[in-house]
Amino acid sequence: GWLRLALLVTTACQSLSAQGVMPPPTVALANPSFDAGGSGIPGWSQRGDQYGAARIVHDPVASPPNALEMIARGKGSSGNDSFMVFQVLAPAEFRGRQVEFGARVRTDGGASNITLYTPEKLANDFFTDLNSGKYVDRRATLDVPANASFLSFGIQVFGKAGARIYVDDV
């Protein structure tokens, strides 16, 4: 069930730093509305390319001009075998504070997870309505531990190959 999925998500987040592919931390999210120009998805890193892909789209969007489309591929995307876009944040800016996080999400055959992760504690917002038909505000909070050694914000797509989610206004 969802407890097992939460444990697998924890493993997926923990594997980020183990892979040695960490971008430098920032004090705030870069390109949170996916409207910045450039190639790829400016400001965002990706993990699990064998399980999914992401691209900037102009339709459907929650607020113009752009949104992020995430698509599960291959054998699908779930738990530790999932596709994620993420950013690393400087933990010092957030230690000891309650942080609200979220995004506007639209699903088309897939589920989403928005996560704020530290090795010491994490919080998730799972959206399991596989066909929402419209953008829905998704929010959660995390009391960032005073001893947080690492902090990342991530968005995952879950589902069979071809499952899609759209994300805007992080």
Image: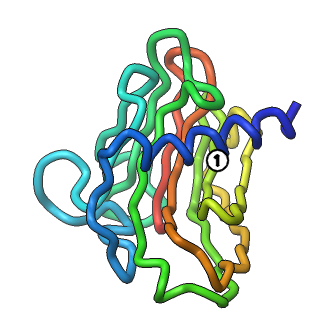
Q: Which residue is drawn at 61% across and 66% down?
A: 102
The image position of residue 17, as x and y in percent, is: 43, 49
The quarter in which the N terminus is drawn is top right
Image height check: is 14 above or below 25? above
Residue at 59% over, 47% down: 106
- How many labels were placed on the picture? 1
Please state if 90 lies on the left or on the right of 41 as rendered.
right
Give coordinates of residue 34: x percent, y percent.
32, 60
Residue at the spot 84% in from the left edge and 37% down from the top edge: 2
The image shows residue 128, relative to residue 159, as above or below, that is below
Residue in front for this viewpoint, 100 or 23: 23
Secondary structure of the residue carrying numbered label 1: strand
Residue 145: which quarter of the image? bottom right
Q: Would you name the residue on which mark 1 appears?
A: 113
* Residue neighbourhood size for the residue with mark 1, other residues' Cα within 10 Å, grouped as few (<14), some (14–19), many (≥20): many
Where is residue 63? Give x, y as percent.
42, 66
* Rendered image quadrant of residue 19: top left
